[in-house]
Image (cartoon, rainbow, N blue to C red):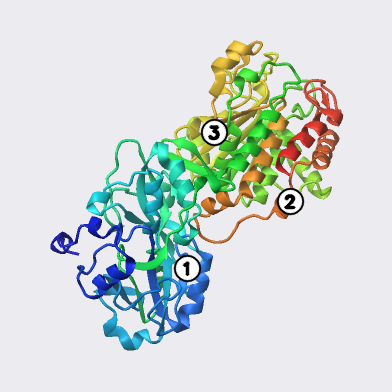
Amino acid sequence: MSSETKSKFIDVKTLSGALPKDVRQKIRKKELVDGQPTTGMCEGYTQANLSIVHKSLADDFEKFCHANSGPLPLLYKSKPGEYAAPALSQHDSDIRSDVSMYNVLVNGKKSGSVGSLLEYEQEMKEMSTFYLGCSFSFEDALAKARVPLRNVEQNLNVSMYNTNIRCHPVGVFDCYQVVSMRPIPRNKIETAFQVTHPLIEVHGAPAHIGDPAMIGITDINKADYGCQVKFQEGDIPLFWSCGVTGLMALQSANSPLAFTHYPGCMYISDTPVKIHDLSSLPDKPKVIALKEEPFFASVTAESVVSKVKALEECIQDDPGNRGISPLHIPDELIKSALSLSHASSVVVTTGFPCIVNKTPPYENDGLSGAIAIATMLQALGKQVTIMVDADMTTVICDIVKTLVSRGVIPKSLDVTSFPPSGQDANLQTAREFLSGEDELHPKYQHLVAIERVGRASDKTWRSMRAVDLTSLVSPIDLLFDAAKDMPYVSTTGIGDGGNELGMGKVKDRVVEHINQGSEVACEVAADYLITAGVSDWGGFALSMALYAVSLCPVHDRYLRRNVGFPLQKAEDLQKVFPTVERQEAMLTALVDHGIHDGILQQLSMSVDGLPFHPVHAEKLHQLNKFVL
């Protein structure tokens, strides 16, 4: 579109309060320039994207819309040869002439753009029109919530981008999602999400918050469609599903002839936009920042945040009187669970060889928690690997086999060690171990350490009594060191004393508040740190938090980027949920394989000197009630 044509666009403010029927008449009579964007016109009324396909493809395209309702929320499907949309517009309406510009697709390729479809009158008799919700429609709601939109005065407030988000394919329709981007001030992100969340008929809440690279956008300053929007200091990019996805879908079908609206040129209906009172929402979305650089946030419901907070508080009991309270960082449990939910591949490492005069030397705390986390992640469809010291791989493999044979866990888990056989233990080896096809796709996206002895400042690994365990430990800490410089690898540490891997995040507090803290404090930090009175409790709580987050409809839709169908079923996840019966059976298996209580230094149905009944069983009952 030429700059001369753009200069003829009318000032949108003159039509912001106009009625849709009047604007449609202006478009039909060519009183508006072909290609005039409709954003900002007819405030309060629903605008629609268009996809016009041959009747032979209409049923599959309808299914495609339902399968990808984020970018393609179907408002109305016409019959072949029907030019009005009575469900949307009560006044005079003709889809062949009431849009300021249309794309023409021939054999799946755009052949040009036209200001009217009247010349295709014969072909239109065999075609169905799909009216699909448009995100321009919810900008009134954002404005009423005092969420500022950039460049509105120039009618240039939306940039659109192709992404790496694959839509759910149906028949010949198979494409990637297009998103529209709006820069939103950091302190208004949650409001913007909450305001648009109920408006599912016009795309609903954002599909992504923050880092553009995560959804395949390499340069935020180069829009694929629409206009380039300028950022102001403190702005975060929010990406909504976009109806231009319909254009991608029709191109993928390679049909002889199809039409869509020209990007930005919508059909304006007579249907008012529903603006919801946020105070009336039964369970508002909660936006939680997970990374600052590059910025990325996830979302779940307020009720889930409350459940996970209750889990987090419950595991702060300190039966060993170690004084762990100052080490606690609030809200790390929900952040870790959300980050893990977005990961596709996870390493769970554990192992505290504090029984130095026994074989095997591992204590039992951490092992049950590690398996609880790993099996929940596995049930969620993640690639999961348990990592232990090389001398312990056979023992842990045998334990896993026993758990499967006894029906305690549904299927086997991969077990490995670091460094790989024949390779040196150094930072470069760690980077290579974590690396994948590129920076955005590492081999492992999240590392979890639970009750894993961590490296102290003097480069030794020590028990809480400051006993040097270095000869029994593999330097798995190097993976956490390497992850610091890998923006798409996140880490979680779970501990109960201060010497566990990940506790470097609160090293100063460990030195100040924990007995012999200056000697035993781990220097290696994790992105998210979960403290608990017993590390196993932290593992159980994280497994339960993953359960709660994954069954949250708000989070599920965000995780799917608004395409496809719900990912999880409660009955599948309950098969690995940490119940009293399951964890008692797991502890029994550990005892049968010679794994000792680290405090009592003996084989017993106890962990950290505390009997399973009643102490750990009661804690599991308490945790269960918050989630189940």
Q: Secondary structure at mark 3?
A: helix
**Residue type pointed to by label 1:** Leu
Q: Is residue 487 left or right of residue 351?
A: left
Tell me residue 519's x, y (percent): 61, 12
- 2 and 1 marks in contact (CB < 8 Å): no
Residue 317, position in %: x, y? 72, 24
N-term-proximal mark, 1 vs 3: 1
**Is residue 4 left or right of 278 when viewed as pictured?**
left
Using the numbered discs, state the Cα–Cα distance from disc 1 to disc 3 in whole angstroms.
Answer: 47 Å
Residue bearing the label numbered 3: 479
Q: Is residue 110 visible?
A: yes
Q: Secondary structure at mark 1?
A: strand
Question: Could you say whether the residue bearing mark 2 is in a helix, strand or loop?
Answer: loop
* Numbered tag placed on residue 74 in the rendering: 1
Location of residue 142 in the rendering, given as x and y in whole percent from the top left corner: 39, 48
**Residue that protrudes farthest toward the left in the picture:** 4
